[in-house]
Image (cartoon, grey):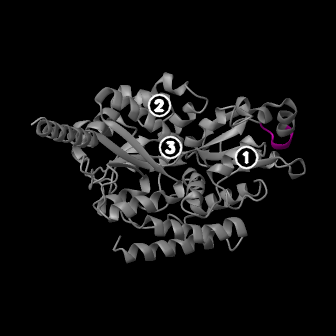
Amino acid sequence: MRKLVTSVLAGIGLTLACGTSVYAQEKSLTIFWAEWDPANYLQELGNEYEKETGVKITVETTPWSDFQTKAFTEFNAHGDAYDLVVGDSQWLGAGSTGGHYVDLTDFFKKHDLGNVMAPATVKYYSEYPGNSGKYWAIPLEGDAVGWSYRKDWFEDPKEKEAFKAKYGYDLDVPKDFKALRDIAEFFYRPDQKKYGIAIYTDNSYDAMAMGFENALFSYGGDLGDYSTYKVDGHINSEKAVAALDAYKELYKFTPPGWAKSFFVEDNQAITENLAAMSMNFFAFFPSLINEASNPNAKNTGFFANPPGPNGDQFAALGGQGISIVSYSQKQEEATKFLEWFIKDETQKKWAALGGYTCSAAVLKSAEFQNATPYNKAFYETMFKVKDFWAVPEYAELLQQLNQRVYPYMIGGEGTAKETLDALAADWNATFKKYGRGQ
């Protein structure tokens, strides 16, 4: 009899243990993102959520080089390994039309996120198609391209005197693209192993596009008409041609071997005393104010992408929104996490941890703008950003841009006009293939 009772009790214990395991599993969420510091900050924020709610948050990461492939492999398999994904803004078209993302339009309206979040982040991280009022992601990691610079080089009295004598105006943070070019030229001293500027030049994924767009948008140019998909007269306009020439001009003043450079190399330009100024996403600036990773941290300053010749001032958008994966078995729990994430107090925590908040109120606060040496430039930038095409075929459009622009930028093949005319023809053919603008 005792054995039978023991056996029954053991069975009950096993059932309870299994039940607890299942319950714990239900009270957990997995978020997929790329492997970088903001993902670590999100994990810290998730730990706070677990303390408050008992729901365990796991931020699963993978290297940037594998991120897109791994995410879409899981999506296309209709897998439920991830409950939420922090996807690139360019993924919105593929994520929504492919059925991979949950429609968050009602969520947006319920929480008035069009007014809560900075307008540009809603437009580029959340809405697809453009101006449709359909939303598929919540702005999470705001980001854009900005600039770091060597304050000690700029503030050296002898340098200031020599610059004023040569260019006729004071050496300072560049007030426009002309000054950006002049300063790059001034500090270009190969014999001293000092160089003027570091820019994006890599021709894989979106590095070249993100770099060139900073000149394109501030020169008053654009990629095309996002509503009609017309590209002729936009990507190959006179303003776009002038912008590509201006970007190529900057390449003349980069360090040697700068033909395949992206965010890692551009931070190294500052940490290794190579360049006076360096382009990079704001997400990579925290390491530049850390003396452990940047010996020049105390002498590193930051500024927003400067205006072009006609006063236009924009920057290439980076950053990501967070979406609920449609194949997740925990969509209700994922929605609760998003409701917590968008709260003002959570957004303040997110910003304090090092995440780049998209909350308009937090961005505008003096507390945020004074928190780091680059936050004010970030605030200024996030209300002046534009993005690449977010259509499902964006990867083809990026590849075509790389194939056309890189040989001109780095190899000096052809002219800017010939390059952009050819790119316009490529994009026209691509949009026609997918039935856009017909």
Q: Spatial distance from mark 1 to mark 2, Cα to Cα?
A: 26 Å
Q: Give the residue at x 39% y 42%.
A: 58
Quarter of the view holding residue 120: top left
Q: Is residue 247 visible?
A: yes
**Element type where label 1 sits in the image:** helix
| Residue 340 percent location from the top left of the image | 31, 32
Q: Spatial distance from mark 3 to mark 1, Cα to Cα?
A: 20 Å
Q: Who comes first in sequence, dot 1 or dot 2?
A: 1
Quarter of the view holding residue 261: bottom right
In the image, 409 versus 37, the foreground residue is: 37
Which amino acid, by three-letter code, is at mark 1?
A: Ala
The range drawn in magenta is 165-170
Q: Who comes first in sequence, dot 2 or dot 3?
A: 3
* Residue underneath mark 3: 143
| Residue 230 percent location from the top left of the image | 42, 67
The disc placed on residue 269 is 1
Q: Residue furthest right?
A: 191
Quick check: 437 left or right of 144? left
Locate the C terminus and report the quarter of the image it occupies. Answer: bottom left
* Residue underneath mark 2: 351
Q: Give the residue at x 81% y 40%.
A: 168
